[in-house]
Image (cartoon, coloured by chain):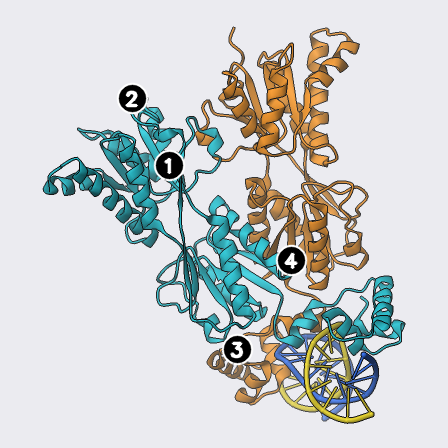
Chain colours: A orange, B cyan, C blue, D yellow
Amino acid sequence: MTTINDVARAAGVSPATVSRVFNGGRVTPERAERVRRAAEELGFAPNRVARSLRTQRGSVIGLVIPDIENPFFTSLARGVEDAAQQTNLSVVLCNSDGEVDKERRYLSIALAEHMAGVIVAAASRDRTDLSALTDRGMPVVAVDRRPRGASVDAVLVDNMHGGEAATEHLAARGYRRIACIAGPPGVSTAEERLAGYRDGLRAALRARDVPEDEIDDVLATLTRHGDYRVEGGRAAMAELLALPEPPDAVFVANNLMTVGALQALREAGLGPPDFGVLSFGDVPWAPLITPSLTAVELPSYDLGWTAAGLLQDRIAGRKKPLQTVVLRTALRVRDSTAGPRR
Amino acid sequence: MTTINDVARAAGVSPATVSRVFNGGRVTPERAERVRRAAEELGFAPNRVARSLRTQRGSVIGLVIPDIENPFFTSLARGVEDAAQQTNLSVVLCNSDGEVDKERRYLSIALAEHMAGVIVAAASRDRTDLSALTDRGMPVVAVDRRPRGASVDAVLVDNMHGGEAATEHLAARGYRRIACIAGPPGVSTAEERLAGYRDGLRAALRARDVPEDEIDDVLATLTRHGDYRVEGGRAAMAELLALPEPPDAVFVANNLMTVGALQALREAGLGPPDFGVLSFGDVPWAPLITPSLTAVELPSYDLGWTAAGLLQDRIAGRKKPLQTVVLRTALRVRDSTAGPRR
DNA sequence: CTGAAAGCGCTAACAA
DNA sequence: TTGTTAGCGCTTTCAG
């Protein structure tokens, strides 16, 4: 492995000069050229490990996500990656699998590897602990979910508003018993989407002069919790359909559970648009679905891009107060919520 | 940041001893315990950067894939990750986007970061160049595709056998005119799968006493090339359906094209199992499809797992001759090939 | 079994 | 502008 010293010798300059050539220091063009030629000839590439050790700052950022197989997170990852390219940072993708332990392992690796910073889509709102990083001054940005009490920048989605808009849309289209398949309790996105659903449905019921005390009953009856995975969505949908008074529409709190819900509906001989289906988050491979699916579209790519931007600001040492950026969702109306048959 | 020296001082031993405690050197239990307690108290974690510099061997392996949004590769990535965990290696995921330039950039980063090794799903069979790594002695394993002329271990899939088995299955189920939507000409995986189809169909036709010279005609007529994407599959399927004597089944050479083919069929008012559909590679979100889809399953996870195993052998310095591991595919029979209506 | 000491390759003061 | 020098935190001989 050729080092900076080999190049220095070959070019007849000092190692410091070689370093300067590679880091934008002031060097006379003539010598700089000599150095570059020597480096080229010897096939020299600066040893980033040595550099990191010396500068106390790596050129890698960690991205910790709970599910690498969920298209939402891969798209987010692309956003991070594209943004990072611009500053010559590379991205290490760490899959926590939604497990707090695995996540902790990765976070401590980030520390030990002296990464430049970390972007985290937390596995748990209550149990993910970012303090080990922030205490030691490592820049951290939370994305999609913000762990409780963490004092870090965050880029989030306006879940509550999205959930409310979705529910209002279903009501406006004439569905009367709108159910909700919510995410896991304790996950912030899940709770916010659920809150949006509640507000939206409450308003709709009031508009129909449903008595206040019945409203709470209805809300409780029509809500099920899933695990943000296909199987959970299927099970929850099946339960809802088994209700004495089953729903005629469902708001599903994430994309994978929507896939499961659609399966359960099909098995029961039901389907959109007679039974309204609205997904929070686009469903992968939507072309496979007929009728086309109404969904709350999430800015997954921008989430990643924005988070990476904030992180780079911190890495560059810009001292701003903590920021929380909230990105809006967009309701994409398609055919699965066309309204129940008359 | 607390260092090994801080711990040494606190425990009243030398830094060397602390190092030994953390690396399985021989230390008397009593002192080891003292060191561990001190480390615990100070919240010490060994600086991996310094260690890498010193030992000249990092604890990160790079995984370069052409498309992070393709489920095939994310599954492969999980395989790599799980295997790496066992040796305490972490995995850096690098997305080349199928671009040789981006790929080259990542490969040189791998070198500069002194990674322990690299697993590459090459962006191009002809233009991906691994020699920069192998020349400098960095362990490299090719996965899914082996770049031409690279002398590295490789883990591949038995494409030809899979194609043949698929076609035989369709014939056995009673389909008479079995078409093929092949991949792009010049791509090795595409050609191997096509060859499998040809062999399989030829055998089936012979069994039906179709004259040899007609067989070639049939093969030519019933084959279309697509681009491994949804739209290509749809177009190819549409062409096949427009034939004077259209097929009654199709073998589609990759997952995305299958999605397109299914769309085209639906538009024509056709569908499995009357029209047999068999996909090479599982279709993402297969649960969305009714009837369920028969597919040649690719061992994507095992591909990653196996590649990581080979890489670890190399990293550990085991000197074996170069290996090429070929993993078998498995035909997963489901409902889309139940056979044509009587 | 333990400690002292010498770097791994690079960068950042400081002098020249 | 350039070179000299002193480490970054760790591992690893080599003596003891």
Label 4 vs label 2: CA separation?
A: 57 Å
Q: Where, quadrant-wise, is the N terminus of chain B in this rendering?
A: bottom right
SS for dot 4: strand
Residue B133 lies, in percent from the top left, at: 48, 70
Residue topped by disc 3 = A44
Residue at the image point whose x is 52% and y is 55% from the top: B305
Find residue B258 and name its label: 1
Compared across the picture, whether A339 is left or right of B222 comes to: right
Residue topped by disc 4 = A61
**Type of the residue with mark 1:** Thr
Mark 1 or mark 2, whichever is nearer to me: 2
**Type of the residue with mark 2:** Arg
Q: Where, quadrant-wise, is the C terminus of chain B in this rendering?
A: top left
* Relative height, residue A323 to residue A114 (above, below): above
Query: A90 or A241: which is nearer to us?
Result: A241
Query: Could you tell me which chain the residue with mark 4 belongs to?
Result: A
